[in-house]
Image (tube, rainbow, N blue to C red):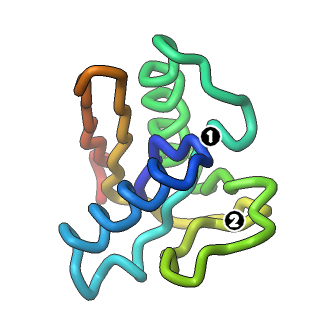
Amino acid sequence: YISAHGTSTPQNDRSESLAIKLVLGDQAKRVAVSSQKSMIGHSLGASGAIEFVVTSKIIEEGFLTPTINYETPDPELDLDYVPNEGREARVGVALSNSFGFGGHNCTHVLGHPDR
């Protein structure tokens, strides 16, 4: 699972999706990707901490948060964005991406201790 930075801006969403495809290759379409910002907005400096906690809960609870308001998909961005409705999933490992102005970027890797 990937908790995307996902600001719902064309440039950011395209860049992040293409990076996921570049890194994961053929496996990219098998990985669920969603953004909590679609539900709570962008909390700027607090975003990374909030999304880290949510990603931890996704692993613990086994439920993927949706990307809400996903209405007009870009045909080139064809990953599993968990559109509009969350769903159950057994997540063993997850990434939480956070990008900031001026090149301040962080990705947390989280894992379930029993998976």
- Quarter occupied by the C terminus: bottom left
Residue shown at the point (22%, 80%) measured from the top left: 25
Residue 46 placement (x, y as % from top left): 50, 13
Q: Nearer the viewer, mark 1 or mark 2?
A: 1
Q: Is residue 40 left or right of residue 112?
A: right
Label 1 CA crowd tier, 10 Å (few <14, some 14–19, many 20+): many
Relative to 66, does residue 106 appear above or below in the rendering? above
Residue 7 placement (x, y as % from top left): 56, 41
Identify the secondary structure beneath mark 1: loop
Relative to 29, does residue 10 appear above or below in the rendering? above
Q: Which residue is mark 2?
A: 87
Residue shown at the point (51%, 80%) measured from the top left: 78
| Relative depth, front residue between 112 and 82 | 82
Residue 73 placement (x, y as % from top left): 67, 74
Q: Which residue is mark 1?
A: 36
Identify the secondary structure beneath mark 2: strand
- Which badge, 1 or 2, is on the more N-terminal residue? 1
Q: Residue furthest front?
A: 11
Residue 70 placement (x, y as % from top left): 75, 63
